[in-house]
Amino acid sequence: MHLPPYFARFRPRMLSAMAGYSRERFFKDAGSGLTVGIVALPLAMAFAIASGLKPEAGIWTAIIAGALISGLGGSAVQIGGPAGAFIVIVYGIVERYGVANLLISTACAGVLLFLLGFFKLGTLVRYVPVSIVVGFTNGIAVLIMLSQVKDLLGLEIPKMPADFFSQLRAIFGHIDTLNPYALGLGLACLLGLLVWPRLFDTQTRYAHAFTNRLVRLIQAGEGLQLKRATRLASRLPGPIVALLTLTAFAYALQLPVETIGSRFGGIPRGLPGFALPDFSWATVRLLVAPTLTIALLGAVESLLCARVADQISGLKRHDPNQELMAQGIANFVVPFFGGMPATGTIARTVTNVRAGATSPVSGLVHCLTLVGVVLVAAPLAVHVPLALLAGILLYVALNMGEWREFVELRRASNHYRLIMLGTFFLTVIFDLTVALQVGLLLACVLFVRRMSSLFQVALVSQTENAACFRLYGSLFFGAVAKIDPILNMVESTPQGLEIRLDVQSLQLLDTSGLDVLEQLHKAIVSRGGRLVLTGLNAQPRQVMERHGFLDKVESL
């Protein structure tokens, strides 16, 4: 049976991953999915709360979008769900347009993502310069850290504003309401997350000290159970350890801190209901900018995450177009269940790979794990202090930012510095939409400037009645001014000249470049001279033939 071409374009990785699927692979996928599901729970709640939504919005996005992205996506091991990169965008949209319009923007962005993949435009995302990606990633990380200061310090701010300077003003204006218990819990959580992985990393000095102590205990006959406990502890995700231990500590001591229960009233144990957003074309027109931002950031983040997964897993490379179609379907569906934008998540994907995942089955198990935890343990979430979630998000932001890039700027070109720092500061001070627009515009302008600098015109020889020039590089709209010296020579000479252009090193010619050559030809002919071209390459020849220019000049 032959499928129509448009059906053949939609081929999830799950189909090929199931070929030769074994029980051994299933147990690996089940173990990794269980691990990622536990890791995803506190992150999903934290991302939703930081975005100005209820915690269940993040949880059900992780479940529904995660299942769709794993089941329909083009990567074998990528985990989808709410991501830290969306916090600033979602919070700004909620502040400016409201939750209902966030749902519409997310659904529209889903349609755009699906169309990008369906028409095989996934590779275009790779054209976004790395300087822009680093700039807005670091900018988002700074904004995430700033947005968590309120809950970390336990400040009594009724509603946190969305923009950078207003947030600073609100924080300093309410600094007298600082809650030392919240600050202590948040810092303990952050410190624990920083130290926990280093305890079991054999390449760190913390691990050496920890291991030496363990060896001494074992040699003394006291450490067999401790060794087993340590092996088990090394497999526990740091966020879960921090969440469970510090929540129990705060509950046992009845610390006066704000919790999920005191702010949101808890997390519903039932499945979310299906609801249609209040949709109208007039509203959609107002949401063009946030829709494009969600779609672009979702595409960039998901494909970057998929590339990271390819590198560390060693499995078959992902299909970027299929991945975008799956991301589109997920983002179109989740708003009908009160969800938020979703994309590929690097932290959970890396955890999935390192836990031994071999196929998208691990992503589905991760979703089932979340469902089980929500249905069973939802009543306990009311006791989770918000300061703990702030500590987790601070840890996420610290790992999200590529801070070494600021140090490496001293080795970078001026163009790279301008684009990266410009995108960074625009993200922090204004918003990501402005940063992406200006960053891409700057990248285009600087690229044109750089390419035009590579085009050169060299005078090879000159006599009283003739001159020979050699053209190097690309003659396009950004480089046409470099033909002016030849035009000036022709116009300043009353008698006719023979101008010979050696274009053997001319690699590219656009219509603007052809137009200036036509102006040069007219100026030469009007004075009784002639224009001769030598060594034409394929692309310039095609442009000249298409516009009939070769019929007017001599070509050797």
Image (tube, rainbow, N blue to C red):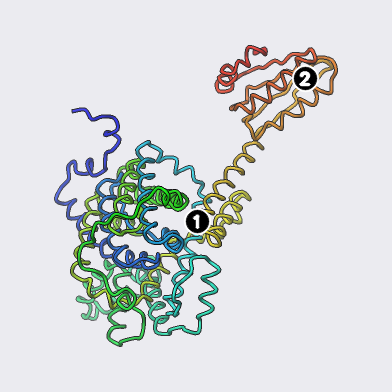
What residue is pinned by disc 1? 432
Placement of 470 over or under 25, stated as above or below: above
Does residue 202 appear in the picture of this structure? Answer: no
Looking at the rendered image, the disc whose residue lies closer to the viewer, 2 or 1, is 1
In the rendered image, residue 332, in percent from the top left (x then y), is placed at: 32, 49
Relative placement, left or right, of 6 versus 303 is left
Relative placement, left or right, of 149 versus 272 is right
The one nearer the camera, 292 or 398, is 292
The one nearer the camera, 338 or 525, is 338
Q: Amino acid at mark 1?
A: Leu
Placement of 299 over or under 529, stated as above or below: below
Q: Amino acid at mark 2?
A: Ala
Mark 2 secondary-structure assignment: strand
At x 51%, y 76%, the residue is 171
Relative placement, left or right, of 339 versus 150 is left
Q: Rate crowding at label 2 as few (under 14), some (14 to 19) or many (20 or more) other CA atoms within 10 Å.
A: some
What residue is pinned by disc 2? 467
Give me the disc on residue 384: none
In the rendered image, residue 459, in percent from the top left (x then y), is placed at: 75, 25
At x 64%, y 24%, the residue is 514
Of mark 2 and mark 1, the one earlier in the sequence is 1
